[in-house]
């Protein structure tokens, strides 16, 4: 049985990865649909505003903090190599670090940066907007599933 400070670390990992999954799920299921239904100039302006507003201490604490927790869980698991839950702990860490945090860095943020460099009412932005919504949302679905799966396998490690 996992206990003590290691137990607390994993519970915090469950909480963090689950919270991130919820944020991403909200974007995948209704925010991006709503933005995609707007005229391109309004959608681009709104998404750019969301992307600026997202970089707050509260969200970054949850998102980046969860990545740090997942990395800590992986390192502690390698060092302690517990009999119980080692596969689940390593899998949960990998799911979040690669499938959520990593994808954010290599798939979603570059698209956000491209969009931020466009004037919302420009023909260039209007042409890019449908592609942005489709691709960004697709990668966000993957981030959602990876974050939720990380939370689930961390919980399984505790059982």
Image: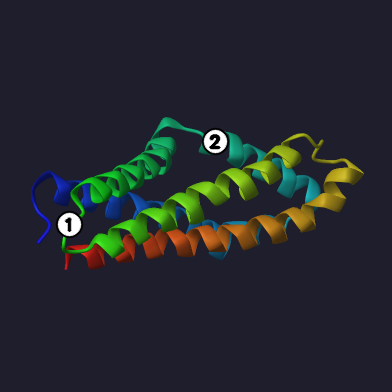
How far is the residue under mark 2 from the one under mark 1? 41 Å
Q: Position of residue 38 (x, y in %)?
A: 73, 55
Q: Residue 91 occupies which quadrant of the picture?
A: bottom left
Secondary structure of residue under mark 1: loop
Q: Is residue 154 left or right of residue 132?
A: left
Q: Secondary structure at mark 2?
A: helix
Residue at x 17%, y 64% (from the top left corner): 84
Q: Nearer the viewer, residue 48 or 91?
A: 91
Q: Residue at x 39, y 65 (%)?
A: 149
Q: Is residue 23 visible?
A: yes
Mark 2 residue crowding within 10 angstroms, few (<14) / some (14–19) / many (20+): few
Q: Residue at x 18, y 49 (%)?
A: 80
**For residue 1, side relative to residue 147 (left or right):** left
Q: Position of residue 119 (x, y in %)?
A: 82, 36
Q: Residue furthest top?
A: 57
Q: Are marks 2 and 1 in contact (CB under 8 Å)?
A: no
Task: Please identify the quadrant where the C terminus is shown.
Answer: bottom left
Quarter of the image with the N terminus is bottom left
Rendered residue at 71%/61% (across/down): 134
Q: Which mark is residue 53?
A: 2
158 vs 55: above or below? below
- State the residue position of label 1: 82
Dot 1: within a 10 Å radius of its alpha carbon, few (fewer than 14), some, or many (20 or more) residues?
some
Image coords of residue 68 (percent x, y): 36, 40
Question: Viewer-nearest of labels 2 and 1?
Answer: 1
Image label count: 2
Residue 82 falls left or right of residue 68: left
Upstream in sequence: badge 2 or badge 1: 2
As drawn, the label of residue 28 is none
The answer to whether residue 12 of the structure is visible from this angle is no
């Amino acid at each position: 049985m996992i206990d003590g400070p290691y137990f607390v670390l994993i519970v915090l990992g469950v909480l963090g990865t689950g919270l991130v999954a919820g944020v991403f799920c909200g974007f995948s299921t209704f925010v991006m649909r709503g933005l995609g239904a707007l005229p391109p100039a309004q959608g681009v302006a709104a998404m750019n505003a969301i992307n600026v507003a997202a970089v707050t201490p509260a969200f970054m604490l949850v998102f980046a903090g969860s990545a740090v927790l997942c990395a800590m869980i992986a390192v502690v698991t390698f060092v302690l190599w517990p009999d119980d839950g080692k596969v689940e702990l390593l899998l949960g860490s990998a799911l979040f670090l690669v499938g959520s945090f990593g994808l954010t860095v290599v798939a979603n943020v570059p698209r956000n940066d491209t969009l931020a460099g466009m004037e919302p009412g420009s023909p260039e932005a209007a042409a890019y907007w449908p592609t942005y919504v489709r691709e960004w949302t697709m990668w966000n679905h993957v981030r959602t599933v990876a974050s939720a799966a990380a939370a689930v396998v961390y919980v399984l490690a505790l059982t």
